[in-house]
Amino acid sequence: MQDAIWEYTPNCRIPDNKPMPEGIYRYAAIVTYDGRDYCGFQKQRHSPSIQSELEKALSFVADETIVVSCAGRTDTGVHASYQVIHFDSSAERNARNWIMGCNSQLPDSVSLVWADRVDPTFHARFSALARTYRYVLISQKTRPAILSSGITWVQDEINMSAIQSACPSLLGEQDFSAFRASGCQSISPYRNVHAAGVYRSGELIVFEITANAFVLHMVRNIVGSLLEIGLKRRDPEWISLLLKHKDRCRSAPTAPPNGLYLVYVGYPSKYGLPDIPKGPLFLGSEINGDN
């Protein structure tokens, strides 16, 4: 056992041939949150974060200090209907204990919707195969009063067919420097986009994108440029040109964070994470093939 323990640190990647230390268990949870009052997922000294709220609540239930790791570090003001976390603990709690106990300690803007013990090799970030984001817009003359912090308002009419024509240019593995924020710490600007498209849900316009991973502000920067096309200021071919030039200065300003949601993270089936209809809830579960 000593050979397995020496390299273990909480929440680390556990190789297939290495067991967890005796008495330590790996748990996973799915979290939903309204990000408007937080500096993002990652814990910060100067501002409230989703991570700090989760760790306080989970530590209360476990009666020991808990540190969590997540599938994606959402930015300030960004929401999630399917954020995945994992954590290690010596506490033996069942799914109901974790969910009910943790939610009793969380603010109304954060909630666990699923939790359970998982295989020790599961890692919220490194086991993920893909992430899906949705960006929600409304196009109307007057400012919306309801859900104003959860959607982005555009006054002018949006040409959805023009945006849809631009979306295929985003597909495949390519350099996304044109949509990469200057503070990005990723070694490579290359990402593989599996799907991208736009559709309506009632009066709302939804842009959805799935990729293996994303560089910093990638979705919001893409949406900002797609809006230029949808507002007829640019042609659909502009996206291809931006990708070709690999220059962030040539693309449009970053879209606001309030319309962005992390709605799904895909994992190998062996880990047993549940399929939950993509959010946010006000879109309904019937859109885009959801059950």
Image (cartoon, grey):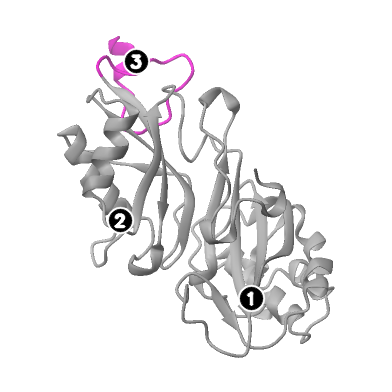
State how far apart marks 3 and 2 are (Cα): 30 Å
The magenta-colored residue range is 1-23
Is 21 covered by the magenta stretch?
yes
Q: Earlier in the sequence, mark 1 or mark 2?
A: 2
Please tell me the numbered disc located at residue 4.
3
Q: Residue at the location (34% across, 15% down)?
A: 4
Q: Quadrant of the C terminus?
A: top right
Question: Which residue was labeled with disc 2?
Answer: 43
Q: Quadrant of the N terminus?
A: top left
**Relative image position of residue 185 (x, y in whole percent):** 49, 58
- Who is closer to the viewer here, 207 or 7? 207
Image depth: mark 3 or mark 1 in front: 1
Query: Mark 1 sits on what residue?
Result: 224
Dot 2 alpha-carbon crowd within 10 angstroms: few under 14, some 14 to 19, many 20 or more: some
Name the side, left or right, on which 69 lies relative to 273: left
Amino acid carrying label 2: it is Lys
Residue 5 in percent (x, y) is at 30, 18
Residue name at image x 66 percent, y 51 percent: 286
Q: Amino acid at mark 3?
A: Ala
Cα distance between the residues tagged 1 and 2: 27 Å
> Compared to 271, does 110 lie above or below?
below
Task: Please provide percent x and percent y for residue 119.
Answer: 44, 22
Judge the density around disc 3: few (<14), some (14-19), many (≥20) Cα neighbours within 10 Å. some
Mark 1: amino acid:
Gly
- As displayed, is residue 212 above or below residue 9? below
